[in-house]
C-alpha cells in the first residue's frame, strides 16, 4: 500500500556531507503519513533510530547526530530527506527510511553510507 524508494547513499570521507532521499508512493489517496523517519544499521549491530519528522513538522534526533543531521520533507510530504553533514566513520551503516502511516509502518530497502578515508 505504501512503497518507499531510497537513494543518495555513497562513500564519503570523514567531514563530508551526503543527502539521502526517500520517495513514498501510496496505493490509495486516503492513506495518511503520520511520521517519516530514518534508521540505520551498522554491521553486527541492531537497527537504531536516527531522526523523525511528524505530520505537524516536529522533529527529533538521536543524540549521536544532533547538530549534524537534518530531516525534512518536500511540500507534498511524499519525500523525506536526511541531510548529513560532518560525517564520521561511526555513521557508516545501511540507512532505512520508515513511514508510519494510517494503514501500517513501512520500510524502504536501505541505502549504504560509508564514511572512511
Image (tube, helix red, strand yellow):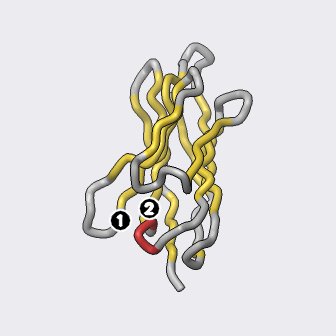
Label 2: which secondary element: strand
Label 1: which secondary element: loop
Tell me if residue 76 comes above or below residue 13 in the rendering: above
Name which residue lies at 59% across and 70% down: 10
Q: Quadrant of residue 56?
A: top right
Residue at mark 1: 42
Q: Give the CA distance from mark 1 to mark 2.
A: 6 Å
Badge 1: how crowded within 10 Å, few (<14), some, or many (20+)?
A: some
- Please give the label number shown on residue 26: none
Residue 109 visible somewhere in the drawing: no
Q: Quadrant of residue 90?
A: bottom left
Residue 77 on image: x %, y %: 65, 29
Residue at mark 2: 94
- Asked if the residues shown at circle 1 and circle 2 are in contact, with their CB atoms under 8 angstroms apart, the answer is yes
Residue 104 on image: x %, y %: 40, 26
Residue 41 on image: x %, y %: 36, 59
Residue 69 on image: x %, y %: 55, 52
**Mark positioned earlier in the residue sequence (1 or 2):** 1
Amino acid at each position: 500500500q505504501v512503497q518507499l524508494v531510497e537513494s543518495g547513499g555513497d562513500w564519503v570521507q570523514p567531514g563530508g556531507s551526503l543527502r539521502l532521499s526517500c520517495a513514498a508512493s501510496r496505493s490509495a489517496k486516503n492513506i495518511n503519513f503520520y511520521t517519516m523517519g530514518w534508521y540505520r544499521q551498522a554491521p553486527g549491530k541492531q537497527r537504531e533510530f536516527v531522526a523523525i519528522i511528524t505530520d505537524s513538522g516536529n522533529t527529533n534526533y538521536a543524540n549521536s547526530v544532533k547538530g549534524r543531521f537534518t530531516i525534512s520533507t518536500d511540500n507534498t510530504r511524499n519525500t523525506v530527506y536526511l541531510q548529513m553533514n560532518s560525517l564520521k566513520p561511526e555513521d557508516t551503516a545501511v540507512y532505512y527510511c520508515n513511514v508510519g502511516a494510517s494503514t501500517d509502518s513501512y520500510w524502504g530497502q536501505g541505502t549504504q553510507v560509508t564514511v572512511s578515508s
